[in-house]
Amino acid sequence: GENVEQHPSTLSVQEGDSAVIKCTYSDSASNYFPWYKQELGKRPQLIIDIRSNVGEKKDQRIAVTLNKTAKHFSLHITETQPEDSAVYFCAASAGGYQKVTFGIGTKLQVIP
Amino acid sequence: SAVISQKPSRDICQRGTSLTIQCQVDSQVTMMFWYRQQPGQSLTLIATANQGSEATYESGFVIDKFPISRPNLTFSTLTVSNMSPEDSSIYLCSVDPGNTEAFFGQGTRLTVV
C-alpha cells in the first residue's frame, strides 16, 4: 500500500518568513496530492491540492510543487502569519474514490 | 462540496461499553471513510464503507471491534465496541463526493475511562 513520509514534524518560523514542508510517497499509482490544515480541536480542511499532470500550483501565499519522477511534493507558505499556525498534513491518493493516505503531520508555529 | 454532520461531537464512556458514531452527508456519495486520529497523531484509515456491501477494513482493524453500517448513500455509522482507554481518540468520517477532495465531519472526541 501507499506510504507517505512527511518532514519536518515541527517547524517554527518568524512571522513574514517562508515555511516549507516536504513529503514523499511510495505508490507510483498515486495521482492526487492534497494538503490539509488542522487547527487545534478542529477537523482537517483542504488548503490546496495538486494532480500528477501538474508540476506546480499556487493560491495566494500557498504553493505546492510535485516531482512525480522522484515521488515527492512540497508545500510552500510565504509571508507567514500567526494564523498559519496549525498542523499541516500531506496526503496521497490514487484517485477514483481510492483511500487517502496521510503523512504524520507538521506542527507549524509562526512566531509574531 | 459536501456538508457532513457527525455526532456525537464528544463523549466520555466507560470501558467495556460501546459507542455508535453517526455520519450524515447532505448529498449522495459513493464512498464513506472512517478515520481514527489518536492524540497528536496523523489520521489512520479504519475502513471504507460502501452502500450495500460490507465495509473494507485496513490492516489492524477488524469488524468485531469497529462494526460499520452503510444503509444508504448519505449515512453511515461506526461503532467502537468493548472500549478500552486505548480507544480514546478522535474519530472522523470522510467522503469523496466527486472524486475530488476528501471532506471531513467535525469529528467525535472519545474518551474511555
Image (cartoon, coloured by chain):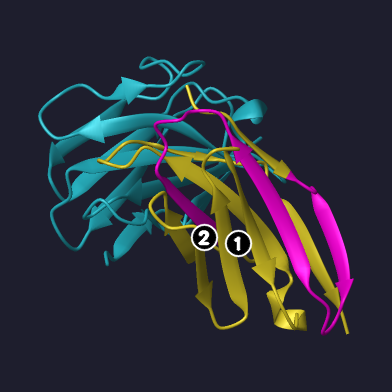
Chain colours: A yellow, B cyan
SS at badge 2: loop
Query: Mark 1, chain letter?
Result: A
Judge from the rendering whether residue B87 lies leftward or rightward of residue A6; answer left or right: left
Give the mark nearest the N terminus, 1 or 2.
Answer: 1
Quadrant location of residue B58? top left
Does residue B93 appear to the left or right of A38 in the view shown?
left
> Which secondary structure class fits the magenta region best?
strand
**How far from the left and from the top, in percent, is residue B83?**
54, 26
As rendered, which of A107 and B84 lies closer to the eye? Answer: A107
Which of B88/B57 is in front?
Answer: B57
Q: Is residue A45 visible?
A: yes
Residue A35 placement (x, y as % from top left): 54, 57
Q: Amino acid at mark 1?
A: Gln
Q: Respond whether the residues carrying marks 1 and 2 are from the same subunit.
A: yes
Rounded to the nearest angstrom, the CA distance separating label 1 from label 2 is 6 Å
Q: Amino acid at mark 2?
A: Arg
**Horizontal placement of B96 versus A11: left or right?**
left
Q: Secondary structure at mark 1?
A: strand
Residue at point 53%, 22% (across, down): B16
Residue A105 visible: no
Compared with A23, A57 (above or below) is below
Quadrant of res B46: top left
**Mark on residue B37?**
none
Asked if residue B85 lies in the magenta stretch, the reply is no
Residue range in magenta is: A7-36
Badge 1 vs badge 2, beta-carbon distance below 8 Å? yes
Height in image: B60 above or below A64? above
Mark 1 = which residue?
A: A38
- Which residue bears the numbered disc 2? A43
Where does residue A53 sit, x and y in percent of width and height?
38, 52
